Image: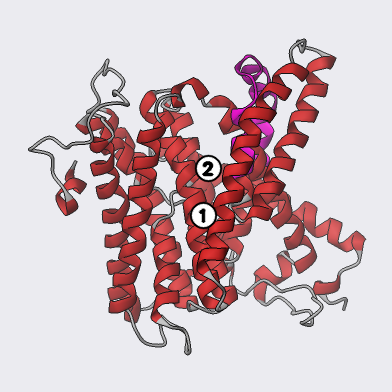
Amino acid sequence: MQPQATLLPMDTFFYVLLDLALILVAAQVVGRLFAQFGQPRVVGEIIAGILLGPTLLGGNLGAAATPTAPAVEGVGLVGVLFPPPAAAFLNLTGQVGLIFYMFLVGMELDASLLKGRGRQIVLVAAAVVAVPVALGFLVGILLTGPIWVPEGVDVTTFSMFVGAAISVTAFPVMARILQEKGLIATPMGATGVGAAALVTVLMFLAIAAANALARDAGIVDQVGLRIGLTLVMVGVLVFVGRPLVDRLTRDTADGPGLVTTIGLLLAGALASGLIADRIGISALVGGFLFGLVVPARLGPAIISRLQPAVVLFFLPVFLAFSGLRTDLKLLGLDLVFGLVLFLALMIIGKWGVGYVAGRLAGFSGPEANLLGILMNCRGLLILVVALRGLELQVITPQMQAVFVVGAIVTTVMTGPLVDWAMKRLPTSAPPPDPDAPATLPEDAPTGVGAIAG
């Protein structure tokens, strides 16, 4: 029998088609089921991806041969259905689709809403990253032993990775929830998406710092270089990319000209994603930033053509591949304390801190509460941290499983809490003043009390 790690191209094509069909059917069925219970469809798609993995089907993914390691055969039903060549295709397809999705999010976001809100965005993003990273060190102190920390890993490296995980905000999932709820074009929604984008950049910088610690490299050099390159990239997109794109698309109208323009803009989104990936801040951030520089006059026509394919095809593929790397059966009673601690700190560090930061940014109590709820959404981006930690052997598989439970819980709770919080919003609340003094009202709750909104 042909080893699945080294399938012939014809056999690989068979498995790719089979896997894509399974993923799309599962995403539609589970997504629709969750929608009937008031959850955003994307939550069901996340669960569908996990159900296609070892948690339900059993086994594990295999691995193709590398210059330093031989091929590894997959185990169980997951190993049979998703051989390494097909799984590699799914991974790359999902990553490309995520860039396109964030490109659409950037276009749909009214960039004018971000003007004058830089202080709000920076304040919110800095707060919901700095506090969770600090809480990661509290976890490092309380969770010790080989079940949590691999042998030979120092507490600082472990804590930094945990802090990065707690600081995650699911940028794509949050953006899609805002889309579904019709909030993405509001001042609060724009501030939330802008802050989530910045949070994603800061999260990857935290991972870079943890990576440097794990490899005994210079943290200042690693993180400082990425910050500098990110600022350069943003400057080039704003001062060069925006005028260039506007000039090249000035005469674009519906028809063949628009088709050509869409092709060129997709190439630009991929190029921006490539640069962001090389910098180390994630390709999805690059796609989002490029979407922001596309003229608003092109947005509706391009979004209407691309969104169905991206949302119905590419995004479920990305979520499914993430689920293939997750096995919730690793959870046991000996993990209960750590799991509860981790969930509590996740909620306090994002919902509670997001509320306080929202008030400091000038939003009303209900708006700040909604902002904190959205910041608490993790999606599966937290698995980026977990998988990187496993690669560097600074967290255990059990800790990765805890990360996944945290992703599920905080994502599932987001939809109902958003609906609840939206009922408390004033019907015609004025946009917050970006120049409002950064002070909380005397009766504003802080810390754990802020969770109650």
Of residues 378 and 268, the one drawn nearer to the viewer in this rendering: 268
Q: Which residue is mark 2?
A: 172
Taking 424 as reference, is 203 above or below it? below
Identity of the residue drawn at 48% across and 76% down: 395
Q: Is residue 278 left or right of residue 168?
A: right
Question: Could you tell me residue 75's position as x and y percent?
Answer: 67, 77
Question: Could you tell me residue 128's position as x and y percent?
Answer: 35, 50
Taking 217 as reference, is 307 above or below it? above
Q: Is residue 206 left or right of residue 426?
A: right
Residue 374 visible somewhere in the drawing: no
Of residues 366 and 419, the one drawn nearer to the viewer in this rendering: 366
Q: Secondary structure at mark 1?
A: loop
Query: In which quadrant is the C terminus drawn?
Result: top left
Q: Which residues are magenta?
A: 285-314
- In this view, the residue farthest toward the left is 443
Identity of the residue drawn at 37% across and 48% down: 126
Identity of the residue drawn at 82% across and 15% down: 257
Of residues 53 and 202, the one drawn nearer to the viewer in this rendering: 202
- Magenta segment's dominant SS is helix
Q: Which residue is mark 1?
A: 381
Question: Could you tell me residue 35's position as x and y percent?
Answer: 45, 38
Marks 2 and 1 close (CB-CB < 8 Å): yes
Let me know if residue 214 is in the magenta part. Answer: no
Identity of the residue drawn at 63% across and 14% down: 297
Of residues 251 and 55, the one drawn nearer to the viewer in this rendering: 251
Q: CA distance from mark 2 to mark 1?
A: 9 Å
Q: Quadrant of residue 38?
A: top left
Identify the amino acid type marked 1.
Leu
Q: Exactly how many numbered labels are in the figure?
A: 2
Taking 283 as reference, is 154 above or below it? below
Question: Could you tell me residue 61's position as x and y percent?
Answer: 67, 71
